[in-house]
Every structure is written in C-alpha cells, then in structure tokens.
Amino acid sequence: MDFHSIPDVFKIKQLIHQKKYLVGGALKDWNGPTSEVFSTISTTPDYAPTLLGSIPLLEKEQAMEALEAASIAYNKGQGLWPTMKVADRISCMEKFVTQMKTKRTEVVKYLMWEIGKNLKDSEKEFDRTVDYIYDTIDDYKQLDRTSAKFHKHSGVYAHIRRGPLGVVLCLGPYNYPLNETFALLIPALIMGNTTIFKPAKLGVLLLTPLMEAFQNSFPKGVVNILFGRGRTLASPIMETGKIDVLALIGHSNSANALQNTHPKKNRLRIVLGLEAKNPAIVLPDADLDLAVKECITGTLSFNGQRCTALKILYIHESIFEAFRDKFCTEVDALNFGNPWEEGAMLTPLPEPNKPDYIQGLIDDAISKGAKVLNRKGGQRTENYIYPSVIYPVDKSMNVYHEEQFGPVIPIMTFSDIQKPLDDMAESNYGQQVSVFGKDTKTLAPLIDSLVNLVCRVNLNSSCQRGPDVFPFTGRKDSAFSTLSVRDALRSFSIRTFVAAKDNPYNSEILKEMLEEKQSNFISTDYLL
Ligand code: G3H
C-alpha cells in the first residue's frame, strides 16, 4: 500500500508529539523522557511501521502530583465537586460532551492508526461513547428524581441518596481505548468522585484532541491524566493507600497486583472488567447458517481482540462436519485490509508481537495433535496472522486455557452437553456464553444451568457487551462489580443518608433547610 491510496482525511500529515499532561486543572509541559508511538500499519512498499508521534513517559513524581491534585479536589468530601448540586455536575458533563463531539473525525482516525480498528467499528466506538455519556446524564437525573424524597419508618425520617466514594484510579484497555475507559471515567465523575486516569499502552494519541475539553469542563483536579507505564505510575499511587476505587478494564493479573499494593484493603472498592473465554455451544438442531454467521462475528470482529469475543467453540459431533465446512469457507472469505478500506473485517494487529504469540498457540496445539482446518489459517504478513480454525482441541493445549485475544479459533466437539457445562464450571472465567439451537425442551434446562455459570446467555447470537444499558459483568476472574449505564452509577457510589427522629424540633430544621435550599444533599427539588 502506498501513501496515496489512503483517503486524504485519514492521512497522517503531521506527527503528534504530545508533551502535555493534565494535573490540578493545568495542562503541564513535560520535558523528560518520551516514548515514540508507532502504528503497525505500513505506508511504504517494503513493510515499515508508521511513526505517529510520541507521548510523555511520566515518572513517580508526576503520579504523586496527580494523586495530590485529585485528593485536594475531593478535599475529604468537602471539595467543590463532591458537594456540588447535581444540576451543576451535569452542566460540566454536558460542556465536555459538546466539545468531544467536535473531535469525532480526529479521534476516529487515531483509533484506526493506533489500534487498527476498522472505520465502521471506530465510528461506532466514538458514537457509542457519546451516547453512553448522554444516557448516563439521563440516568443520573432519574436517580436524583427517585432520591428527592423522605422515607419514614419506626418514627425516623430518612433522606437517602448515593454519594461519591473519593479518589478513583481509572485504567482502560487498548482494545476500546475510548469507550471502555470512558465507561469507567464518566460514571465515576458524575457521581462526584475525583479521578486519575492513565490510558493503556496503545490507543493514547487519540486522547490528545480531548485534553482541552477535560481541562475546561471540570473544576481543577477533578480529572487528572497521566501518560506512561503502569508500573511507574499506578503502583506508587496505589501504595499510598489514598485511592478509594480502582477502576480497571484489563487483565486479572494487573488488577490483582495493583490491589495487593494497596495497604487499606477495606477502603479500596474495585470495579473490574477482566478477561474471558466465552464459549459458543452449537446444538444438533441449530440453524447452521445463523450459527456460522454469529460465530464468525463473535470470534473475529476486531480480530478477536474483545473481552466478549467467542474464544472457544463447542460443536455437537452430529453436525461437526457440516459446521466445519461452512465455517472454514466463511473464515477464508474474510477480507484483510487497512482499517479505512471498504469491507476490511480483518485488520493489522496493533501489538507487534501478537502474530508470534498466536503462532505459538497454533504450534503448541499442532504438536499435541490438532490441525489447522482452513486453507488460509496461519498465513503471515508483517502485521498479521490469518485466522486459524484449530481442531481437535483438548485441555493439554495452551489455546484451550489462554485468552488468545487474537485471530485463532479453537474448536471442540461434544456428544453430551455435560462436557461444555463441566468445562465452564471448571474455568476461571464466567462472563458470557452463546447457545445455538431451537428445541425448547433442550434449551430451557440448559439455559437454567448456564445462567449460573456466566452472567449473560446469548441465544442464537454471538456474545457482546451492548446495548450498554444492559448489565455487563462476569463471575470469577472475568469481572468485579457491574457496569451498565445504571449499574455503573451504583458501582461508583455508596448509599448515604440523613436520618432524623420525627419530632417538631427536627421537622422545623429540615423544613427550613428545604425551603431555603441551603443543602445540596437534602433537597426535594429534582431535574426534569
Ligand atoms: O473488550 C470487551 C468489550 O467490552 C466488548 O464490548 O461486546 O461491545 O465489543 P463489545
């Protein structure tokens, strides 16, 4: 591919040397070490990664500065932001999203270059995030409306609301650097917490166009943005014991390591979206065309780099051959291309070492008796390895256990449904499952068991997080806390209330506070 074949709007005409980080309301200049940002997409006849720019490699001192700024902004619960009226916090969020919408083209362009997500999915990620912010605002208003009252029980009045938890450390993943990160950051903020946010190792420059909007939309210290390595920045922050919530979408190893460094275990709340190994179970009476179509989407959208991706397929042995033939034909018909190319479902892998890792899984499985079933499986270019359908897979193979997060599709067959059920029960993961079939006498008891092994059973469709209003969570090493628009508001807050015995003395005080609108917490006004 040469430079001229890239549509003008997506060309990298200028490098972004991001020199600033946001702390205490100021976009500060960084003159220390930086890290170059490359795209694995090549624009030259001989393969070469494309330089996109650079980001600061901040150090412990800046991490401490951000923690200090977030703590001052929270100010032991007395800060402007945690005590602010609901309507005023919403205005700040609206100001932010209004500016964010103007940056769509730029953010979408960097989603494509930095993580190789195709144009359609990059646009979807941006639009879905904007919708998420508006839905969060609406849900927060609803929460406020339902809280704007007094309860009375056993002679005690209670005015119950949800309050913030404190300082939130927010760490997002590379595969959804905008959506998943904002799905943590936005609810944390709107509930009155202050935040320190560090983007993942990839998908960082796409935040540059939003830095000013963060700076000018929220009071100082409410949003602090750091760039650099997790070990240098996040670990020292956690070690202080001053973080109230660890919000992380990523791997359970990182989540566990970070939790372990926090000295005040009961102070720390955790909101985690972690890895998964979602299976598809294809029953003998499944509509095969539908099952194949959904398994293609489930295993290979964004090259399988989704926590919700289907990562292992269980096919009933009576239909295995028919499924295999259709599935392999469909896999081999998928188009590989650069993210902006029409119909490119398979796109360059953003991690330079990913093709080797996937190759390692394939080699390991082959050495233990599996075969690559599809013709194009395992074909390599500098930035890609074509999806391999691997069969028969068993528990001795790494691809059975590991979350591959890339284009390789392990298949197992079964004759007794107890086999996938036992495997799921034994697994460390428990996010979602897809079941393909029709006979309700089989499906009903199966669903009754599956809902107790995972947190979403997808009937005749692939696994996915959306729509974002539905609960997104998992069992075991797959998640902690629930994220949906509504649940996230709860995950980042705690019920707190004012209680008063029902007597004329207290009633007079409460009445005066309400009439004169003296408290932002005790209030029966609500937003429409
Ligand atoms: O990486 C995990 C994402 O939450 C998946 O979301 O199912 O909408 O792609 P998605």
Image (cartoon, helix red, strand yellow):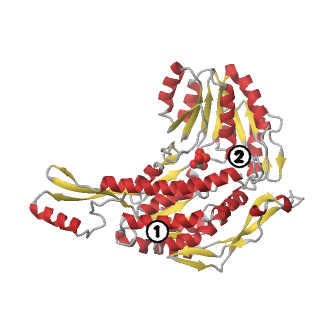
Residue type of the residue flagged with mark 2: Asn
Q: Is residue 430 above or below residue 322?
A: below
Alpha-carbon distance for marks 1 and 2?
Answer: 39 Å
Q: For this view, does 133 lie left or right of residue 14?
A: left
Q: Quadrant of the N terminus?
A: bottom right
Mark on residue 240? 1
Residue type of the residue flagged with mark 1: Thr
For the residue carrying disc 2, how many other residues have a C-alpha within 10 Å: few (<14), some (14-19), or many (20+)?
many
Q: Would you say the beta carbon of the disc 2 residue lies within 8 angstroms of ligand 1?
A: no
Q: Quadrant of the C terminus?
A: bottom left
Residue 277, quarter of picture? top right
The residue sitting at 71% across, 51% down in the picture is: 118
Q: Would you say the beta carbon of the disc 1 residue lies within 8 angstroms of ligand 1?
A: no
> Residue 362, position in %: x, y?
76, 40
Asked if one can make out residue 234 in the rendered structure from this viewpoint, the answer is: no
Q: For this view, does 294 lie left or right of residue 471?
A: right
Q: For this view, does 213 lie left or right of residue 413?
A: left
Q: Which residue is mark 2?
A: 303
The residue sitting at 62% across, 76% down in the picture is: 20
> Residue 437, position in %: x, y?
59, 25
